[in-house]
């Protein structure tokens, strides 16, 4: 069994949720009676360490996790710049680099999954598959994948037609040193680029010849924007 960790970034302000996150960290937004982060933790074995970045209302996240999950191992990383100039997901991830010198899973804190999540014993990228003609999700807000023979070929910008799945912010990183080197190079080009995230890292690695297996998910519960959060609430209320 491979030893690995999970990177769970909660440091952002969750601005797409508007008033919902005015006084609440997006990871603690209640959904069908439980904070979003509780659904995420349920996807992982209790012995897997969770590296949590803290920023916006971060103490509330730390307090909740330590109180409700005393038997789990958390590594908390405080982010000094989590909004405004110089802030980005990439910056927050770099702050957690020293805690993640091993294979790890990047799990965006606005994504809930009810299907199994594989360990990062190989490089993989999770993708949401759906009937795109009937989905209620705002597809124009999401990046997507082009896939061939079970392998991700390309990560597309928002609004590009003809994709195979939607990028969900769930990535298994086996080649972690290449990942960190790639992120550092991207960040160094423009430390003020607020768009630095897992997507350009993965795309750059693919262009270098690193292979990422495609892991399709039929159910992806997005909590990062209001329309998707509404659908997630409906799904989990019915399920419970």
Image (cartoon, grey):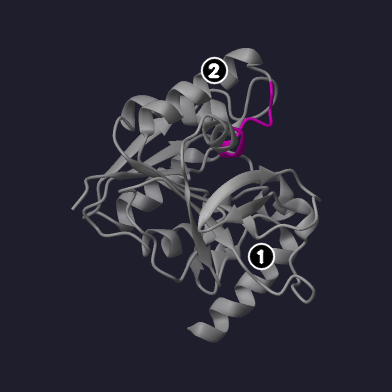
**240 lies above or below 135:** below
Residue sitting at x 69%, y 65%: 228
Residue at x 32%, y 30% (from the top left corner): 99
- Of the two numbered discs 1 and 2 on the same chain, state the one appearing first in sequence: 2
Instruction: Name the side, left or right, on which 5 lies relative to 183.
Output: left
Q: Nearer the viewer, residue 62 or 235?
A: 235
Does the magenta run of residues contain 198? yes
User: In the drawing, what numbered circle is on residue 229?
Assistant: 1
* Label 2: element kind: helix
Residue 78, percent from left and from top: 44, 29
Labels in figure, total: 2
Q: Main secondary structure of the magenta part?
A: loop
Q: Is residue 62 magenta?
A: no
Q: Is residue 30 visible?
A: yes
Which residue is disc 2 drawn over? 185
* Residue range highlighted in magenta: 193-200
Using the rendered image of the protein, determine whether residue 95 is visible from the camera's viewpoint: no
Task: Say the numbered circle drawn on residue 144.
Answer: none
Marks 1/2: CA distance? 34 Å
Q: Is 208 placed left or right of 133 in the picture? A: left
Q: Is residue 144 above or below residue 190?
A: below
Residue 52 picture location, percent across and down: 41, 41
């Amino acid at each position: 069994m491979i030893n690995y960790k999970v990177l769970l970034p909660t440091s952002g302000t969750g601005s797409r949720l508007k008033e919902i996150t005015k006084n609440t960290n997006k990871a603690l937004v209640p959904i069908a009676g439980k904070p979003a982060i509780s659904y995420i933790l349920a996807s992982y074995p209790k012995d897997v360490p969770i590296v949590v970045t803290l920023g916006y209302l971060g103490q509330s996240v730390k307090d909740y996790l330590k109180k409700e999950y005393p038997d789990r191992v958390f590594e908390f990383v405080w982010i000094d710049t989590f909004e405004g100039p110089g802030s980005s997901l990439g910056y927050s991830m770099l702050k957690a680099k020293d805690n993640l010198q091993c294979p790890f899973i990047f799990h965006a804190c606005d994504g809930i999954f009810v299907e199994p999540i594989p360990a990062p014993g190989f490089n993989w990228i999770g993708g949401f598959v759906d009937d795109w003609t009937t989905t209620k999700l705002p597809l124009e807000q999401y990046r997507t994948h082009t896939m061939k023979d079970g392998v991700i070929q390309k990560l597309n910008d928002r609004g590009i037609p003809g994709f195979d799945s939607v990028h969900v912010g769930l990535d298994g990183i086996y080649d972690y040193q290449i990942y960190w080197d790639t992120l550092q190079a991207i960040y160094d080009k423009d430390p003020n680029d607020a768009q630095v995230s897992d997507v350009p890292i993965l795309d750059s690695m693919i262009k270098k010849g690193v292979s990422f297996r495609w892991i399709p998910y039929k159910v992806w519960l997005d909590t990062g924007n209001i329309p998707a959060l509404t659908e997630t609430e409906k799904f989990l209320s019915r399920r419970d």
